[in-house]
Image (cartoon, grey):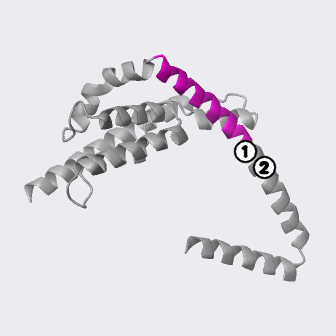
Amino acid sequence: MVHLIWAGLACIGIVYALFNGTIGDVNEAIFSSANEAIQLVIGLTSILVFWLGLMKIAEKANILAGLSRLFRPVVSKLFPDLPRNHPVMGYITSNFIANIFGLGNAATPLGLKAMKEMKQLEPSEQASRSMVTFLAINTAGVTLIPTTVLALRIQHGSVAPTETVAATMIVSILTTTFAIIIDRLFHYKRVRK
């Protein structure tokens, strides 16, 4: 449905430009936007490849495993329904670590694996408590180092590309905290019924 809305808006704009005599501006905007999109994709890909490489090195050097062990008590408290030594705990921890470093695209496959494992542990068709908690935390954004934003700011010539890091950390901590509180409130409200 959304693609039809976008196509309709584009057609209306082009027809309006034809009658308004500004079709040249539309052509210029189309080609300049396409050029900017390609530059953006190449810039983001290089940063993503760099961070994915670092994550792979960390995985091979057992740094991720060490961080998983370090964060396991916290993750176990957040997901009390999940078995403590189940592989899903590693996926969840790795997803959180990737999100903390702002690797949204790298975190997605780990998040999908975690969701798949949690779904296999849930006998009913409904989402489990752990799945809801995991989704709430991921939606809130557990980003402490916004590497994608830093890359965009550097790419566009920002004088101080890291000036948003502190604000991002504060907002990320607040939104994640509120997401966990709201998740717990709704869970206990549902349990009391």
Quadrant of image for the C terminus: bottom left
User: Which disc is residue 40 wearing?
Assistant: 1
Residue closest to the eye, 142 or 79: 79
Residue 50 in sight from this viewpoint: yes
Q: Pointer 2: what residue?
A: 36
Residue at the image position 19 percent from the left and 38 percent from the top:
80
How far is disc 1 from disc 2 in space, using C-alphas? 6 Å
Above or below for 57 versus 128: above
Identify residue type, mark 2. Answer: Glu
Residue 143: % across, % down: 47, 35
- In the rendered view, tell whether residue 112 sits above or below residue 48: below
Three-letter amino acid code of the residue under disc 1 = Leu
How many discs mark residues in the rendered view? 2
Quadrant showing the N terminus: bottom right
* Mark 1 vs 2: CB contact within 8 A: yes
Q: Residue at x 44, y 18 (%)?
A: 63
Residue 182 appears in the rendering:
no
Q: Nearer the viewer, residue 115 or 120?
A: 120
Residue drawn at (38%, 22%) of the image: 65
Position in image of residue 107 (x %, y %): 48, 39
